[in-house]
Amino acid sequence: MSVMQLYRRGGWGSAIVEMQLAHYGIGFEPVEVADLFIDQQAREALMRISPAGQIPVLILPDGRVMSETAAITLHLADLTGRDDLVPGPDAPGRPQFLRWLIFLVAQVYPCFTFGDDPARFLTEEPAQKQLAEASTTRLQELWSILERPAGTPWLLGERFSALDVYAAAMTNWRPGPEWFQAQAPKVWACAQATAARPEIAPVWQQNFA
């Protein structure tokens, strides 16, 4: 394999990696994945590559498998030797970057895992509804936590980073663009500015327009 393969689906978490690859100018071969919530065969096939059965999955040119957007984010920075998306070890913004990167993947992302399709975890419809509603409420709480220290024009202030790429994708999901505009305007502004960047805009349009 001479290029990376990215298992993707439009509008899903793979967009976070796609936008980073576009930023770096790294080509890849897309592997389109069916809706994993409704296509059990697609989920089982993906689980043979990545046991969690989630995308994105990035196959490196040497065949090694990477999952988890944070791991891929850090690897791409190492691979390119660049620090424009991930602050370097001695950069002043490094601790805050790592704090909020892990916050997004460890606190925010699980709300989608459990709330987007509660029927995977609960059999009773009232319980499913409660889980979906609770996950949306929790998302609002978590984004409000990030909104308070969020900078301008980027989440880290003057420094653009992969955090803004995450925001560009995730503000399209629950609790939805209207909520972000009204309740988390700094996060929303960073997301929109990221989506408009020339190297990222085509990928964002493909996934979310």
Image: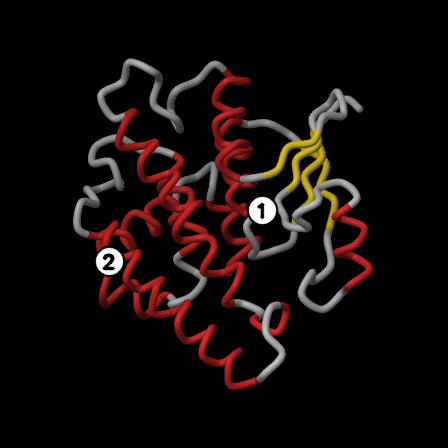
Q: Position of residue 94 (x, y in %)?
A: 29, 24
Distance in Å between CA atoms under marks 1 and 2: 24 Å
Q: Nearer the viewer, residue 73 or 113?
A: 113
Q: Position of residue 200 (x, y in %)?
A: 47, 41
Question: Which residue is found at the position 50% from the left and 35% from the top?
Answer: 20
Q: In the displayed structure, does residue 24 sit left or right of residue 46?
A: left
Q: Nearer the viewer, residue 176 or 102?
A: 102
Q: In the displayed structure, does residue 53 sit left or right of residue 94?
A: right
Which residue lies most toward the bottom here?
126
Question: Which residue is found at the position 81% from the left and 50% from the top?
Answer: 45
Name the secondary structure under disc 2. helix
Q: In the displayed structure, does residue 4 sit left or right of residue 147?
A: right
Q: Which mark is residue 144?
A: 2
Quadrant housing the N terminus: top right
Q: Is residue 202 above or below residue 10?
A: above
Q: Amino acid at mark 2?
A: Ser
Q: In the displayed structure, does residue 48 sit left or right of residue 163?
A: right
Q: Earlier in the sequence, mark 1 or mark 2?
A: 1
Q: Which mark is residue 168?
A: none
Q: Amino acid at mark 1?
A: Ser
Give the number of callouts.
2
Of badges 1 and 2, nearer the viewer stands 2
Colour scheme used in the picture?
Answer: secondary structure
How dense is the environment of label 1, judged by Cα within 10 Å: few (below 14), some, or many (20 and up)?
Answer: many
Name the secondary structure under disc 1. helix
Q: Position of residue 157 (x, y in %)?
A: 20, 36
Q: Are marks 1 and 2 in contact (CB under 8 Å)?
A: no
How dense is the environment of label 2, judged by Cα within 10 Å: few (below 14), some, or many (20 and up)?
Answer: some
Q: Which residue carries the number 1 mark?
A: 14
Question: Which residue is found at the position 47% from the left and 36% from the top?
Answer: 199
